[in-house]
Image (cartoon, rainbow, N blue to C red):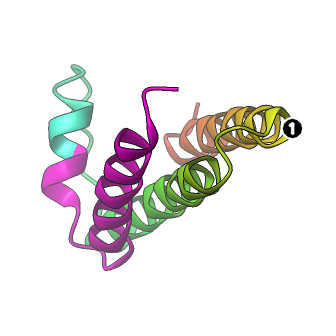
């Protein structure tokens, strides 16, 4: 879409974020993304690590998806499959977040 170099750079950035989140060290990343929503609930360290790992899995799926797009940029079936995987991952993480926050 933007070129193969962009796909590889995005995959690398998502890969680094994935590793940080899966290690459970991504609290600062999640705070930066989440911001202050007015509901500053106190979560235990175990809950924070669980949420961080779930977000790590989500970004990992997107990183692998981006690698596949970078490897096969001219195949329309790969592009459509990649879009479906990304939409599925977004729906899945939305369901997890809703359940995790108790809504």
Name the quarter where the C terminus is drawn: top right
Furthest toward the right, the residue is 77
Q: Residue at x 26, y 33 (%)?
A: 34
How far across and down, in percent of the image, does residue 10 sit? 36, 46
How far across and down, in percent of the image, does residue 30 sit? 25, 47
Left of 97 or right of it: where is 13?
A: left
Assign a secondary structure to mark 1: helix
Of residue 72 and residue 103, the one placed in the foreground of this image is: 72
How far across and down, in percent of the image, does residue 6 sit? 36, 40
Of residue 86 and residue 9, the one placed in the foreground of this image is: 9
Q: Residue at x 33, y 60 (%)?
A: 12
**Magenta stretch encompasses residue 36:** no
Residue corresponding to mark 1: 77
Q: Residue at x 35, y 70 (%)?
A: 49
Question: Which secondary structure is most common in the magenta stretch?
Answer: helix
Furthest toward the top, the residue is 38
| Figure check: 89 above or below 25 | above
Residue 46 in which image quadrant: bottom left
Q: Which residues are magenta?
A: 1-30
Density class for disc 1 (Cα within 10 Å; few <14, some 14-19, many ≥20) is few
How far across and down, in percent of the image, does residue 50 sit? 44, 68
**Magenta stretch encompasses residue 5:** yes
Instruction: Report the number of numbered marks.
Output: 1
Left of 82 or right of it: where is 61?
A: left
| Figure check: 99 above or below 50 | above
Residue 81 in which image quadrant: top right
Furthest toward the bottom, the residue is 23
């Amino acid at each position: 879409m933007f070129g193969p170099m962009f796909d590889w750079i995005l995959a690398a950035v998502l890969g680094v974020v994935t590793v940080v989140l899966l290690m459970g060290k991504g609290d600062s990343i999640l705070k930066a993304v989440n911001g202050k929503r007015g509901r500053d609930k106190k979560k235990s360290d175990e809950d924070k690590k669980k949420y961080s790992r779930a977000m790590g899995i989500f970004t990992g799926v997107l990183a692998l998806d981006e690698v596949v797009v970078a490897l096969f940029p001219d195949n329309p079936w790969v592009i459509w499959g990649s879009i479906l995987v990304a939409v599925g991952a977004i729906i899945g993480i939305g369901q997890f977040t809703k359940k995790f926050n108790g809504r």
